[in-house]
Amino acid sequence: MAKRSLILLGFIVAKFILQYWLVLPDYDLHRDEYLHLDQAHHLAWGYLSVPPFTSWIALLISWLGNSMVLVHFFPALFGALTILIVWKTVEELTDSLFACVLAVSCLLFSVLLRLNQLFQPNSLDVLCWTTLYFVLIKYIHSKQTRWLYILGIVFAVGFLNKYNVVFLLVGFLPALLLTEQRTVLRNRHMYGALLVGLLLMAPNLFWQYQHAFPVVHHMRLLAQTQLVHVNRADFLMEQILFFIGSWVVILGGLYGLLVYKPFEQYRSFFYALIFTLSAFLFLRAKGYYAIGIYPIYMAFGATFLAVKVKSIGVRAALVALPILFFIPLYQVAFPNQTPQAIAQHSERYKKWGLLRWEDGKDHALPQDFADMLGWRELATKVDTVYSRLADPQATLVLCDNYGQAGAINYYTRQGIKAVTFNADYIDWFDLTKKYKHLIRVKSAEGSADELKETSPFFTTAYVAASITSPFARERGTTIYVFQQAKVNITSRLAKEIAEERW
C-alpha cells in the first residue's frame, strides 16, 4: 500500500478510535437519538421535523442488532467519509502530501468529534455539504457533465437527510452569478441534473404536500420558540469556536481564493461563504447549522499554505495547532468523564458556560450530557411495572416527551410500544386496541397533580417508581399506574390527538 494511502487510512482509523473513546459507557444515548431510532418502525416518506433518510439508517441499525455500538458507528462513518472527501479535494487541487495531512488534521480535531458522536441527521448533513462542494470543484476543473448529474443526486440525498442543505444552494447560486462560472447555468445538463434531483426528492415533497407541509409549521414553531432567542453575535462566536484550531488554514483558503492564480476558477467559493453565512445570520439560525460550510475551505487553505509555507518548523506548527487547541476541548466538550467526576470539577465546565441550561440556570452537568442519563433506568422500571400487570397487552404506556417514549421502546425487553403526543409519536398511536390500563410517564415539572387529575377515570391508581439518577435531566420523572379504566381510553386518545395536531 502506498505511503499516501497508509496515512489516509491512519486518519480514518484514528477518527473511529476517537469517536468511541470520547464517550464513556456510563452514558446512555441522547434523547434525540431515540426518536430517530424509533422512526425505523414507522417508515414514511417524511416526518414532522426531519426527512426520511435517517429512518433508513435506523432500519439498517435495527436489522444489524440495534446495539449502541452500531448507533455510534454510523455518525462516525459519516465523519470518516468527510475526512476522505476533504483528502480527495486536496488531491484534486494539488499533489502535496503536506496539504492533505494539514487539511484532515484540522478536520479531525474539531467540533466534528462531538457532532459525530450522535445519531442525528447532522453528521450526514456535513458530509453532503462537503461532497457537494467537492463535486462542484470536480466539475469546474474537468467540465465533465457527469459531475452535474452526481451533483443532483448528492443534493437529493442531502435534502432527504436534512432540509438545511437548501442553504448551500441559497449561498452558491448568487456566488456563481458573480463569476465566470455562471456559464454553468446555461448548460442544459445542469437542468437535467436538476430534474434528476427533483425526481429523487419528489416522494418527500409529495408527502409534505399531503400533510400540509409540516416542515413549514416546524420551522415557524422553531423560529417562535428557539431561533428568536439566537443572538447573531453568539452565532458568529460559535463559528470561531467550532474550528478554533483551524482558522489559520480556513482564512488562508479564503485569502488564496482571492489572490492565488490557480484558485481563480474557484472564486465563487469565496462569495458562497459570505452569502451562505449571511442567510444563516438573517434567519437567526443555530450555530451548528453552518458547520458543513467549513471542511472544504480547509482543503483550499491547506493547498494554498503548502505552496506559500516551505519551512518545516512552520509546517509542523500548522499541523500541531488544531491538536493543541483540541487539548482543552478534550477536557470539557465530550462525555469522557463520569458524571460524578464532572460534578466534582464543575468549575472547569462553568468557566466555559457549559453548565448553563435552557432554563438559564447552572446545573451539575452540561445539558447535553444530562440528556444522556437516566434512560435505561426509566425503561427498566417501566418494564418491571408493565410485566406485573395481569393483562399488560391491554396497557397503554403514555409519556410526556419523545425522549421518554423512544428510550422505553429502545431498551424494553417486554415489547412495549410507548407513545406521546410529542413530535412524530402523535402519528404512531394504535387506536385499534381496547386499552384497560395506563402507565403514565410524567416529567418532574408536571407530575404534582397527575394522580388527582387522572385517578377518577380508573378503579386503581398509584405511583410505581421514579427516576433517581442524580445527574439526569429526567431525574424526578414519575411512573404512574392506572388500572381498570372507567372510560373508553381509545376514544379519549383520538379526541386528544385531534386537539394536539397543528
Image (cartoon, rainbow, N blue to C red):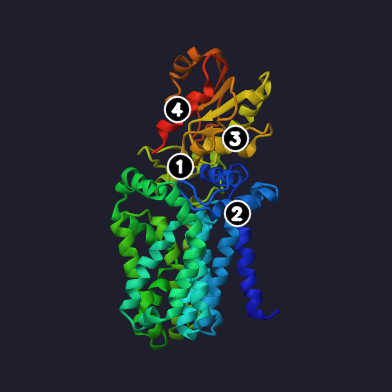
| Foreground: disc 2 or disc 4 | 4
Mark 4: amino acid? Lys
Q: CA distance from mark 1 to mark 2?
A: 26 Å
Residue 299, visible in the rendered structure: no
Going from N to C along the chain, the mark reached first, 4 or 3, is: 3
Q: Quadrant of the N terminus?
A: bottom right
| Foreground: disc 1 or disc 3 | 3
Instruction: Estimate how packed mark 4 is, as few (under 14), some (14 to 19) or many (20 or more) residues with alpha carbons within 10 Å.
Output: few
The disc placed on residue 250 is none
Q: Residue at x 42, y 56 (%)?
A: 288
- Along the line of sight, the residue nearer the viewer: 424 or 278: 424
Going from N to C along the chain, the mark reached first, 1 or 4, is: 1
Q: CA distance from mark 1 to mark 4?
A: 34 Å
- Along the line of sight, the residue nearer the viewer: 285 or 248: 285
Q: CA distance from mark 1 to mark 3?
A: 20 Å
| Foreground: disc 1 or disc 2 | 2
Q: Which residue is mark 1?
A: 367
Q: Which residue is mark 4?
A: 495
Q: Which residue is mark 2?
A: 57
